[in-house]
Amino acid sequence: MPKIPAAVLLAILALSALAGCGGSSQSQATAASGENHFSGAEASPPQPEAPLRLDNYLGEPVNIASYKGKAVLVTFIYTHCPDVCPLIVSHIKTALALLGPKAKDVQVVAVSTDPRGDNRKTVAAFLKAHGMTGRMKYLIGTRAELGRVWKSWNIVAKPAKAGRDLVEHSALIYGIAADGKVTTLYPANFRPAQLVHDVPLLAAEA
Amino acid sequence: MRRLLYLAVAVGAIGLIALEVATAGSSSGAKQAPALPKQVLQGPPVTLAKLQGKPVLIDFWASWCEPCREEAPEIARLQHSLAGAAIVGIDYTDQEENARSFIHKYGWTFPVLSDPDGIYGARFGFSGLPTAVVLDPDGGVSATLRGPQSLTDFRRAMREAG
């Protein structure tokens, strides 16, 4: 993999975050090497997950470390995001449906990128609208609390210049293996079939 | 996490640099489209077999998708100018009441099917919404149009499909 300065990465991710529902001219990014057995891009070697302890929208504490033994998908979204966020959640929902009984081997975690707009009420409505109530841990917090998580997970989240309460943010999904290591990465325009392929492999990486 | 940072760079760069190429093919050798959902939001029920013999536009959309709202009036205009062709909408992972409001708002009168879990959409293999798949009269995939399209884009694709 090429080594590109972090600033370039952040610009790329911020720019790609607000593309139309992940469609338009974006391509499907997949693992480049034929040696990879994951459908998503593979970290080589897998890296320990960064700390992630926040409350979910119901006020319940969530610690990602408690999910060791399962695959975990971590994404960063906000509820009134007009394009990539609902698409990410819908594709995850599709993947869970396609996984069938194997869906019990994965925990989906979303971290808010909008401390101002994401609250108990808006998150509940968002999860209901996307059929994900009870199927996704949606974590919220203050700007300071979320900011610490964004930083440790290399996420950019900032108000969009376009206004309308939009947020420019890194739009990706981390795949965490059962051993607690960040193992795969998916762009916002991933296909559900990639998760269907990778979740059992991530869950088996004990 | 630093290695992952580089990994993310590569993924993001690939996503921005490379362009998706629309699937193209002739009616004689085109890949056949996967089956359509059976759940009907707006009738009549349709199947691929029933649609053969004319070009068909299959449009995947959702009420929560802002670019879909941008495209919806263009599809509404298209439905009034179809001659010997058909449109089928497929609502992807949506709430039914929101989907019905969307259909009503834009005055769509063509058949709309529901894919609440996205399983049928996954078989088509698209990654973003809206996505329109144009079928030739033999049911083969003539083109895949990604992102919001104009009436002109739709007409051109359907004309090329046959």
Image (cartoon, coloured by chain):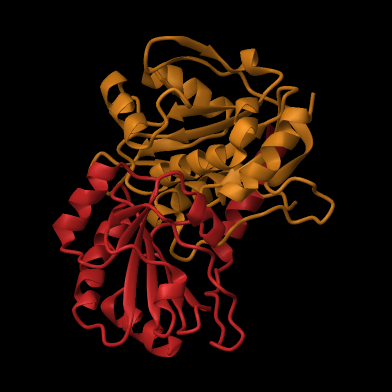
Q: Nearer the viewer, residue A110 or B101?
A: B101
Left/right of residue A129 with respect to residue A202 in the rendered view: left
Q: Nearer the viewer, residue A30 or B100?
A: B100
Q: Is residue B46 visible?
A: yes
Residue found at x 48% / y 39%: A93
> Which chain shows up in red?
B
Across and down, in percent, residue A18 comes to: 39, 51
Across and down, in percent, residue A172 comes to: 54, 42
Left/right of residue B33 with respect to residue A15 in the rendered view: right
Residue found at x 15% / y 56%: B105
Q: Nearer the viewer, residue A127 or A119?
A: A127
**Which quarter of the rendering shows the C terminus of chain A?**
top right
Across and down, in percent, residue A115 comes to: 34, 25
Above-or-below relation of B31 to A132: below
Across and down, in percent, residue B87 comes to: 32, 72
Dividing the picture into quarters, in which one does residue B132 lie? Answer: bottom left
**Residue at the outermost right position:** A35
Left/right of residue B65 with respect to residue A93 in the rendered view: left
Chain A shade in the render = orange
Left/right of residue A184 with respect to residue A25 in the rendered view: right
**What is the total number of numbered labels drawn onto the structure image?**
0
Dividing the picture into quarters, in which one does residue A154 lie? Answer: top right
Q: Is residue A5 visible?
A: no
Residue found at x 37% / y 49%: A83
